[in-house]
Image: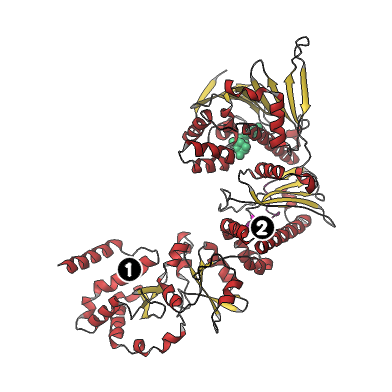
């Protein structure tokens, strides 16, 4: 029999180093992690078995055994779940594949004490065994395969894999407990840990220990330790907050505290139980392009799948938890789930319930709601775009920053603060709040005390297309079209200014096709120039988003350049513009003006090298 040696992925080595040397005081969480994995493995096999009955041939009832042997100082956690073959062992227990662990690695600060506390927050799954064991052996056989494999490691740099024998599919993980961790060889201690962290696991967890009775050699005592009833099936009044929290950690593969827990039973034509959580922190995969929902579907307390598109809309993909149906058949397959009328009505009702809960939270606990909004608002807003029926409700509970600087506001707040006679809801879109705040196009609006909404999530551009107005007031971008900032229109001074007209002529000649038009701005008060989109052109920020995603056909549209007649630079240039030969004399200045406007948009000048050399030339001149 050959034994292969493999090195851990570098990241895993770092993680293991932490585990081996950890002084984390709650090392007991290793057991929660192993039990959670064992339970997942059984769920997986049960689900696979629905479509491939052969896999269940000799599986028996799913169960988790924990065997304690004080003589050899070992603790062995066994399941009869899906098991792992050689490739699985290498990819699951030698690399960082899972999201929780990579989130952990990203949060590592280098400060030992802080990092140790992260272990509790993230769990870091399987690798946490090395906090309590100096050698770990994983014996596993994948369902449907004959070969078994033994994975072994002391958690330092390397692991070995060799072929092995094992009756039945599943996994047995043997921990050689460290000397300073012998508390985990005590029955009462283990019972206590299982009760605390894993009581909700629906498989029986049996603790088996060699009896102390010397006479009867090999005698064993065994005891089922967990309650084993599905937590969501119990009455609310019998569930403690800690139990809800532990279940969230397990079901959501998450380690933050849930911000909101929604637990109810729907009775009537269609019966089901819902236990859902809103996390307090963004899950790692929140912005995955796949936009998958993670809520688990159960049928009569039996796990069916956590990959079910028809359970919740994508814009609620931050939710974690379970929905347990009484009406679906137990052997329901993926195909049968699609377009299933029972699923459709569950999806509808649960979506409605979640939005109503959010609305209630927004009313009753605005601070808590704002926290929720900061984490999940950008995702929820996708619903304005794609859920026609609930568009208005989602918009009502949406929050926005605005130039009024009053923190997160609703659209109704905005309406109530609108100036008399204002019939437009103004907004500016940008990549970030800071970028939005710096936009020169806002200057005139601020001067006139007109509030502008900051739209800083990419999704804002998209839902705006579906919702051109709110409560009868049109949305209008401050970077598009001409700004009707009333009074300034009558400003004769600006309208009849031959020098300014001359400069506009010079700029048009020099910039040619690069701009669509040049005109005097009434949205600027300080800055010299800005770019705006023409009435019928795409908003500047939208164009940038599409460009980033390679979704833009053809070239970007040319912009309208607006100049500020009150700005000293524009005044100086205007004076020059009336002189002979001004077109040539102002060639560099024209280009720099345009480049400057682009930079303020967060774009690069079309020709950065040219920009730099023009700027250098001007600076050199000014120091002569
Ligand atoms: P997570 O459970 O969050 O995916 P872990 O570090 O706990 O991360 O486990 C890593 C992976 O190893 C699991 O996703 C699973 O594929 C595999 N694994 C761990 N324990 C078992 C087991 N008892 N049976 C089958 N697969 C397992
Ligand atoms: Mg795990």
Left or right of residue 438, residue 183 in this image = right
> Magenta includes 160?
no
Ligand 2 quarter of the rendering: top right
Cα separation between marks 2 and 1? 43 Å
User: Does the magenta stretch mainly form a helix, a strand or a loop?
Assistant: loop
The image quadrant of residue 596 is bottom left
> Magenta includes 310?
yes
The image quadrant of residue 206 is top right
- Colour treatment of the image: secondary structure
Q: Which residues are magenta?
A: 305-316
Name the disc covering residue 313, or none: 2
Left or right of residue 93, residue 593 in this image = left
**Nearest the eye: 583 or 599:** 599
**Residue 488: x %, y % from top left:** 42, 85
Q: Are marks 2 and 1 in contact (CB under 8 Å)?
A: no
**Residue 381: x %, y % from top left:** 60, 63
Q: Secondary structure at mark 1?
A: helix
Task: Classify mark 1 as within 8 Å of ligand 1 or not, answering yes or no.
Answer: no
Which residue is situated farthest in the top direction here?
215
């Amino acid at each position: 029999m050959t034994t292969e040696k493999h090195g851990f992925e570098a990241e895993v080595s770092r993680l293991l180093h932490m585990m081996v040397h950890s002084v984390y005081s709650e090392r007991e969480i290793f057991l929660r992690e192993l039990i959670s994995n064992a339970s997942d493995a059984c769920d997986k096999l049960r689900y696979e078995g629905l479509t491939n009955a052969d896999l269940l041939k000799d599986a028996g009832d799913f169960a988790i055994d924990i065997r304690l042997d004080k003589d050899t100082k070992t603790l062995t956690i066994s399941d009869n779940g899906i098991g792992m073959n050689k490739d699985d062992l290498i990819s699951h227990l030698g690399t960082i594949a899972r999201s929780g662990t990579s989130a952990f690695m990203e949060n590592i600060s280098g400060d030992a004490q802080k990092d140790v506390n992260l272990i509790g927050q993230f769990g870091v799954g399987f690798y946490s065994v090395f906090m309590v064991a100096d050698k770990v052996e994983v014996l596993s056989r994948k369902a449907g395969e004959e070969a078994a494999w033994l994975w072994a490691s002391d958690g330092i740099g390397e692991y070995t894999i060799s072929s092995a024998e094992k009756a039945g599919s599943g996994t047995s993980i043997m921990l050689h407990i460290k000397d300073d961790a012998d508390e985990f060889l005590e029955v009462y201690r283990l019972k206590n840990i299982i009760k605390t962290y894993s009581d909700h696991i629906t498989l029986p967890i049996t603790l088996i220990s060699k009896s102390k009775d010397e006479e009867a050699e090999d005698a064993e005592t065994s005891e089922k330790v967990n309650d084993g009833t599905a937590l969501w099936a119990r009455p609310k009044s019998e569930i403690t907050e800690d139990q809800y929290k532990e279940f969230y950690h397990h079901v959501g593969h998450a380690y933050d505290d849930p911000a909101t827990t929604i637990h109810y039973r729907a009775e009537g034509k269609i019966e089901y139980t819902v236990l859902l959580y809103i996390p307090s922190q963004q899950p790692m995969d929140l912005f995955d392009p796949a936009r998958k929902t993670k809520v688990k579907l159960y049928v009569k307390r039996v796990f069916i799948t956590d990959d079910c598109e028809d359970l919740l809309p994508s814009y609620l993909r931050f939710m974690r938890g379970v929905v347990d149906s009484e009406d679906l058949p137990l052997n329901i397959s993926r195909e049968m789930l699609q377009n299933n009328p029972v699923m459709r009505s569950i999806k509808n009702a649960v979506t409605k319930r979640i939005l109503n809960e959010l609305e209630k939270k927004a009313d009753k606990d605005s601070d808590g709601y704002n926290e929720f909004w900061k984490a999940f608002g950008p995702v929820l807003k996708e619903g304005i775009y794609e859920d026609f029926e609930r568009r208005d409700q989602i918009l009502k509970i949406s929050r926005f920053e605005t130039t009024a600087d009053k923190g997160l506001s609703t659209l109704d707040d905005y309406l109530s603060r609108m100036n008399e006679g204002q019939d437009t809801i103004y907004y500016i879109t940008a990549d970030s709040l800071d970028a939005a705040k710096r936009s020169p196009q806002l200057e005139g609006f601020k001067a006139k005390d007109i509030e502008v909404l900051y739209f800083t999530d990419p999704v804002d551009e998209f839902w705006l297309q579906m919702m051109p107005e709110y409560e009868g007031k049109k949305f209008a971008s401050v970077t598009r079209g001409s700004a009707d900032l009333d009074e300034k229109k009558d400003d004769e001074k600006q309208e009849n200014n031959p020098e300014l007209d001359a400069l506009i002529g010079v700029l048009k000649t020099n910039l040619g096709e690069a701009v669509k038009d040049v005109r005097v701005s009434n949205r600027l008060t300080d800055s010299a120039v800005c770019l705006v989109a023409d009435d019928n052109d795409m908003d500047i920020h939208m164009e940038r988003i599409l460009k980033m995603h390679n979704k833009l056909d053809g070239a970007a549209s040319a912009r309208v350049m607006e100049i500020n007649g009150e700005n000293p630079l524009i005044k100086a240039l205007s004076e020059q513009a009336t002189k002979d030969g001004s077109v040539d004399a102002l060639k560099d200045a024209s280009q720099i003006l345009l480049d400057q406007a682009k930079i303020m948009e967060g774009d690069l000048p079309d020709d950065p090298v040219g920009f730099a050399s023009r700027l250098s030339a001007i600076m050199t001149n000014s120091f002569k």
